[in-house]
Amino acid sequence: MTSVSFPPVTRLTPAPSAIDDAAVRWFPHPPREDDRVVLLLHGLGSHEGDLLGLAPALPRDVVYASLRGVFGCGAGFAWSAPPPVDPADPSLLQEAAAAVEGWIARTAPGRVIGAIGFSQGGMLSLQLLRRDTRALDWIVQLSGRPFPAPMPGDAALAAARPPVLWGHGGQDPLFGPAADEEVRTFLREHTDVEEVLRPQLGHGIDEEELAQIIGFVQRQLGGDGAAR
């Protein structure tokens, strides 16, 4: 595994952090009263416009909400501290998860059904389920990992076993075989996981992985995902 350095994470507002409503990006439109919502959660140092680029290819039976990370990181944003992650200190990730929960409660209560998270956004997606198995029906976890310490909700998650698509690259500089196996073990023990390994892919998403994401989301939505 290659050593990769990241800028420090900084606070944007006093604690507790909250989702910036003005920065939320929607596709194809803001939710109507009966629309189901899927979260798009970007990676470390990125922004709310990043995963929104996938949305036109995704099933159209839902509205996609791309959120901005609650902490700063270089020219972008973050959901937690950069790696290496300190397993003794989940405080920033927990604060970010609480911010997302608060946003859901005030924006689309009962209508957020899933999340697609990349890297640190994938960790956040899993953290939402580890805090409350009812938070999401399913997640797509791309090139991410669970926070590396037990959480109080892990037993409930293992009992609920929500559907998870785990997509990752065999050439990812942030992961080696041991780290991949840790993610695999956690997901197999706590979720109904489908793994998509792209052997030549780095820390990113390719066309084949995107096709798998589309198929997975369509199955979770219970239809063909065609535009309405």
Image (cartoon, rainbow, N blue to C red):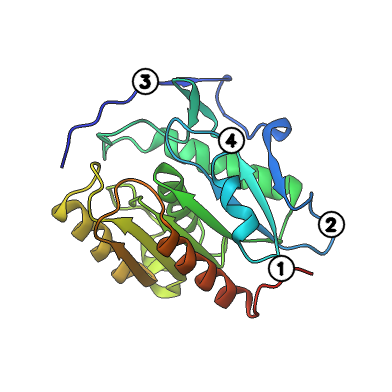
Q: Name which residue type carries label 1.
A: Asp
Q: Quadrant of the N terminus?
A: top left
**Regarding mark 1 in the picture, which secondary structure is present there?**
loop
Residues 4 and 123: in front is: 4
Residue at 34% x, 31% y: name it.
Answer: 82
Dot 3 or dot 1: first in sequence order is 3
Q: Is residue 176 left or right of residue 187?
A: left
Q: Decide: few, some or many residues near mark 1? Use Cα within 10 Å; few <14, some 14-19, many ≥20.
A: some
Q: Is residue 184 left or right of residue 47?
A: left
Q: Which residue is mark 1?
A: 61
Q: In the displayed structure, would residue 80 be above or below residue 188? A: above
Q: Which residue is mark 4?
A: 68
Gap between marks 2 and 1 measured at Cα: 12 Å
Q: Position of residue 51 (x, y in %)?
A: 55, 46
Residue at 14% x, 54% y: name it.
Answer: 178
Q: In the displayed structure, would residue 100 be above or below residue 138? A: above
Q: Position of residue 41 (x, y in %)?
A: 53, 46
Dot label at residue 32: 2
Gap between marks 4 and 1 measured at Cα: 23 Å
**Regarding mark 3 in the picture, which secondary structure is present there?**
loop
Dot 2 or dot 3: first in sequence order is 3
Q: Position of residue 223 (x, y in %)?
A: 65, 80
Residue at 28% x, 48% y: name it.
Answer: 149
Dot 2 or dot 1: first in sequence order is 2
